[in-house]
Image (cartoon, rainbow, N blue to C red):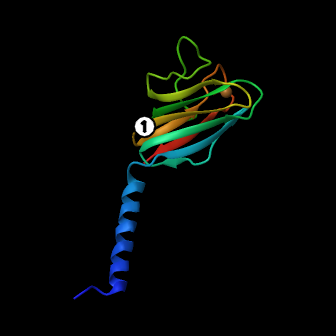
Amino acid sequence: MALPKWLVFVALGLTVLLALAACSKKGLSTTVDVIEDEWSIKPSVTSVNAGVTTFVVKNSGTIEHELVVLKTDLPVTGLRMRESDPTRVDEDTDADNGGEVENSAPGSIVSVTLSLLPGHYALVCNIAAHYKNGMVAAFAVK
Ligand SMILES: [Cu+2]
């Protein structure tokens, strides 16, 4: 005896839903739009799931900026400064530089794709004095 048509449709629907759920947990990457200017960093979201994330960084300012994705347990406004250059954040001692967009020109849009582990992050512009002027944003990976 053949299965009723409605049951076949329900089974197919469930299969599609399960496949979509599996894809959203793994495989698909996340895109975060980031707008930088003097003197702020504004990500479109403040947290993502662990995995592949692409930061699309737009420099809306009038001078060069950059975006460093720094994994750290320190509060984002209390990062350690370099001993050799106190105008820049120390990207090594209490933090891990997970990747960056360097020296993006005013008006440009540059992206970087990173594989992120769970944790607390600081998005920083580490051009001299830009961090201290406010170019930092908290970011979380779950
Ligand atoms: Cu900057």
For the N terminus, the image quarter is bottom left
Residue for point 57% across, 48% down = 45
Residue 130 location (% of width, % of height): 67, 25
Q: Quadrant of ligand 1?
A: top right
Question: Tag 1: residue type?
Answer: Ser
Residue 9, compared with residue 116, is above or below; it is: below
Across and down, in percent, residue 12 comes to 36, 73
Label 1, secondary structure: give it: strand
Between residue 82 and residue 19, name the one nearer to us: 19
For this orientation, the residue located farthest to the top is 84
Q: Specify the quadrant of the image occupied by residue 2.
A: bottom left
Displayed quadrant of residue 23 = bottom left
Instruction: Report the residue that reaches farthest toward the left.
Output: 1
Q: Residue furthest right?
A: 62
**Exactly how many numbered labels are in the figure?**
1
Residue 130 shown left or right of residue 96 in the figure: right
Identify the residue at image location x=56%, y=38%.
55
Residue at screen point 62% across, 36% down:
57
Q: Is residue 55 left or right of residue 4?
A: right
- Is the CB of mark 1 within 8 Å of ligand 1? no
Looking at the image, is 5 positioned above or below residue 136? below
Q: Nearer the viewer, residue 138 or 4?
A: 4
What residue is pinned by disc 1?
115
Residue 17 x, y percent position in the rendering: 39, 67
Horizontal and vertical percent position of residue 115: 42, 37
| Neighbourhood count class around disc 1 (C-alpha, 10 Å): few under 14, some 14–19, many 20 upward | few
